[in-house]
Image (cartoon, helix red, strand yellow):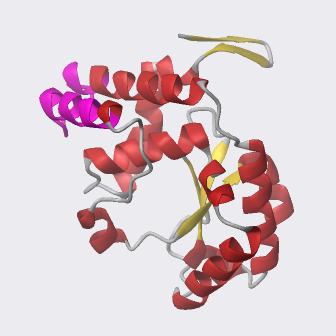
Amino acid sequence: MQWKLGAYQVGNAWRSQQDVFKLLVTHFRRYHLMEIQDVYKLIYQGVRGSSHILSSSPSDFEVNLRREFASVEANNSQPLWESIHPEGKIVRVNLAAYKYQSQKIERLSALCLWTAEISTSSEKDVEHISTAFNTFYKLCKSRKIPKFAPLEVEKYHKWVEENKYPVVHHSETYRTEYDPHYRLVHRDFLSVLF
């Protein structure tokens, strides 16, 4: 449960069925072929941000980003950024849309690394991911999200728990249909990026 007291928010946004529902429906509208794995990835990234990129060197990260950026075609039909957190704290910046608007890859790279620095993993992350996935399960069970069978969501959650909440790729369907190329940025940095 989350409460808003003026400008302050108390509680865990991932517990709020209303907030998680809004977030997921926004993504389902654009990516209607999302699978459970893609929902988990969205939740994982929304909780952990881009902290996992710190496992490689900043120069390796930048080389990979430049390579991927060079390979995508500029496209203004994609949204420039999409929220992946119920409170909008973390966003995915779509590389094709960013390339259409700007060629400043150095700025994007720096902001991704800054985001990783402030997204450092904590012990609470697993709890938040589990809470978020439980909220997703409840939405499916109550048929507010009829797209997924509750038993399949439960089965995937069990697999995630057994594998200690791993980083996953998008599903094959998602990759084929949507060709995702994005980087995670903290929403507060968007004004610096654009």
In-front residue for pair 97/95: 95
Check the picture and name the quadrant holding the C terminus: bottom right
**48 relative to 161, above or below:** below
Is residue 117 toward the left or the right of residue 161 in the image?
right
In-front residue for pair 128/4: 128
Residue 56 magenta: no
- Magenta-drawn stretch, dominant element (helix, strand or loop): helix
Name the residue rendered at 40%, 40% in the picture. 24
Image position, residue 40 (x, y; %): 38, 42
Is residue 8 toward the left or the right of residue 152 in the image?
right
Image position, residue 175 (x, y; %): 33, 69
Q: Which residues are magenta?
A: 139-160
Residue 194 in view in this figure: no
**65 relative to 17, above or below:** below
Name the residue rendered at 52%, 85% in the picture. 72
Image position, residue 57 (x, y; %): 72, 67
**91 relative to 129, above or below:** below
Residue 154 magenta: yes
Name the residue rendered at 30%, 48% in the picture. 37
